[in-house]
Image: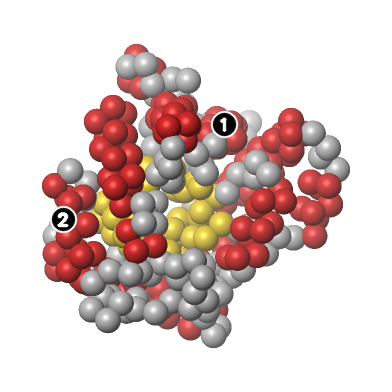
Amino acid sequence: MHTETEKQTPSLSFEFFPPHSTEANLRLWRSVERLAPLAPKFVSVTYGAGGATRERTMAAIATIKDRARLNIAGHLTCVGASREETLNVAKAYAKMGVNRIVALRGDPPKGESRFTPHPEGFANAAELVAGLKEAGDFEISVAAYPEKHPEAVSLQADIENLKRKVDAGASQAITQFFFEKDDFLRFRDLAVKAGVNVPIIPGILPIENFAKMTRFAKMCAATVPDWMHKAFANATTQEETEVLSTALATEMCDDLMNEGVQHLHFYTLNNPDLTYNICRGLGVPVNSFAAENGLVA
């Protein structure tokens, strides 16, 4: 009799963004409460261009770290700051006990079409990674783009840029979201062939609002397949949309795990329920320590 070996559940990470109001603060904490019981390997908090959300990011990190006792990654970008200012933020993270950083070049500030380095700043993410490795004992994640960065001249050039970031000291790459598993698998194969020897973690975006997601995808140059447009057009209520979103994301994550993916990174948009349901659908257990300490929604 053939017995299928039990599939190992994936390790997880969740991305949150810093709140901009009291209501948003409550929403962030509800997201943390909802997802902490899934025992993520780490969570991250985003960081606005030029430090636009610096204080809110720091406050959110401190709250999550102290109250939820989660391993946290702080984001850092090259936008609108000198090297010294950027590394001072990294040192402030380290002082808080945060030694994991997501290092990004960052998007241009609002109103600007292209990234322009600060005269005394880091010119790109590879330089930022190298600077962080000199400044402290940080574990650094960088971005990767399965369909290439919108500004890259080719996918191969973008993969070469990823390799520069890894060579500078990054220990893993987290991808932009995508909706076709083959886009990720093709990219992973090309990256490995190019000598990228760190884990490449798929970034998963659960779809709460299809129209909003498509606008976001257009900005990121992420493809939304025709079949998805048709599927979500037939979902006429919010409940139907969420059921469809959960089913599609769970299936894709399951397929990725069958292809050797061991870690999934979720862009929660501070809306935790879809992410929670997807993870539970993948067999991720609820952590008893979190439940005992009141971290279950």
Please indicate whether residue 185 sits to the left or right of residue 119 in the image. Answer: right
Please indicate whether residue 78 sits to the left or right of residue 108 in the image. Answer: left
Residue at image coords 32%, 17%: 293
* Res. 126 image quadrant: bottom left
Element carrying mark 1: helix
Amino acid type, residue under disc 1 in the picture: Asp
What residue is shown with label 1? 273
Which of 83 and 196 lies nearest the eye of the viewer? 83
What residue is shown with label 2? 91
Residue at image coords 69%, 35%: 242
Which of 238 and 254 lies nearest the eye of the viewer? 238
Amino acid type, residue under disc 2 in the picture: Lys
Q: Are marks 1 and 2 in contact (CB under 8 Å)?
A: no
Element carrying mark 2: helix
Which of 208 and 282 lies nearest the eye of the viewer? 208
Quadrant placement of the N terminus: top right
Disc 1 crowd, CA 10 A, few/some/many (<14, 14-19, 20+): some
Q: Is residue 277 above or below residue 163?
A: above
Residue 189 drawn at (x, y percent):
52, 69
Q: Is residue 117 above or below residue 142?
A: below
> Which numbered circle lies on residue 115?
none
Residue 188 drawn at (x, y percent):
50, 66
Ranked by sequence position, the earlier of labels 1 and 2 is 2
Residue 119 drawn at (x, y percent):
27, 81
